Amino acid sequence: MRIDVKRCAELLAEHDNILILTHAHPDGDTLGCGFALCRALYKLGKICGVANADEIPKKYSYMFEDIAEIKFKPSYVVAVDVATDNLLGELQRQYHIDLCIDHHSTNTEYADYLLLEDAPAACQIMLEVIRELGVEIDSRLAGCLYTGLSTDTGCFKYASTTAATYRAAAELIELGADNGAINRAMFETKTKTYARLERLALDSMRFYENDRIAVITITQAMYNETGSNEQETEAIAPLTRQIEGVEIGITVKEKPDGTCKASLRTFETVNAAEIAKCFGGGGHAQAAACRLECGVEEARDRLVEKSAQMLKG
């Protein structure tokens, strides 16, 4: 059932022992939503926690380093920034989802209640929810929400960024979000292992359809060679959109079991979510993802074929 911000806040206020689920291979928006909501619920005196199927990258530790882990039996489960329940990874089989707060048009409405709004970042919606809860937003909570706004808009560069997004960011900075430190951590600081992986990733880039499609391939061998891992690949997918003339950027990442995950980046001429949907995935018009139960080469060929069809209309 679809609900509005007011009803969403009412549901959160009515329940306790709340577990907040973020999507696998977490990014700044899902984590920003999760830990911002957790902090807000703590302020209301509730027992709550945040869970993820994968290890959370160290660069996000400022969101939760002061939060003590509490063991409790969840009685209400909330998914944030999760378009489909299979994006929860191993957590999908463990929990029934009572409430979902999301901004993906491809949301499959798997939860009992869904708050879905058109926004460039789920954290923009979460800010509305927390306001409705009547919680005072301190600097740490503001930093969580700012992280989601910044990362899901490419540091406010993407066309999806709206005037409302800039106003929300300004409000969060006024409330204490350290925008300079957050932006440096998200967009400028690189580990040595990531720098080595990025070099190999760029070396792997191949072009198709008169250079309108760019494909980066990341294999398990590349992780082993560089000492990097999938948690460090978040910044690689946008690299494909930086090449002049490229309309569709594809990053294929090999999983340990030999299957693949693909990240798609496009400009306004092509809908990335429509390509991802063909492979059981989803996302946004210019940024989407999907999983393919096949090897790297087959995944690349299938994605390029579908992308070429989209370009031809």
Image (spheres, rainbow, N blue to C red):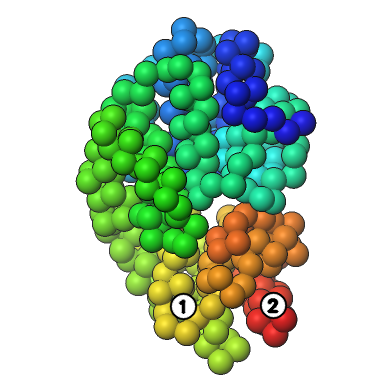
Residue at coordinates 52% horizontally, 37% vertically from top-left?
A: 125
144 is higher (above) or lower (below) than 223:
above
Residue at coordinates 62% horizontally, 72% vertically from top-left?
A: 270
Quarter holding the N terminus is top right
Residue under numbered circle 2: 310
Question: SS for tag 2?
Answer: helix
295 is higher (above) or lower (below) than 75:
below
Front residue of 233 and 116: 116
Residue at coordinates 62% horizontally, 11% vertically from top-left?
A: 15
Q: How many marks?
A: 2
Labels 1 and 2: the sequence-earlier one: 1
Residue 8 quadrant: top right
> Residue 199: x percent and y percent?
35, 72
Q: From where the camera sits, is residue 131 visible?
A: yes
Q: Residue furthest bottom?
A: 210
Residue 147 quadrant: top left
Front residue of 242 and 260: 242
Image-based side of 182 in relation to 224, left or right: left
Q: Amino acid at mark 2?
A: Met
Q: Classify 10 Å Cα crowding around label 1: few (below 14), some (14-19), many (20 and above).
A: few
Closer to the eye: label 1 or 2: 2
Residue under numbered circle 1: 204
Quarter holding the C terminus is bottom right
Front residue of 42 and 71: 42
Q: Amino acid at mark 1?
A: Ser
> Residue 212: x percent and y percent?
55, 84
Image-based side of 220 in relation to 198, left or right: right
Question: SS for tag 1?
Answer: loop
Residue 91 quadrant: top right
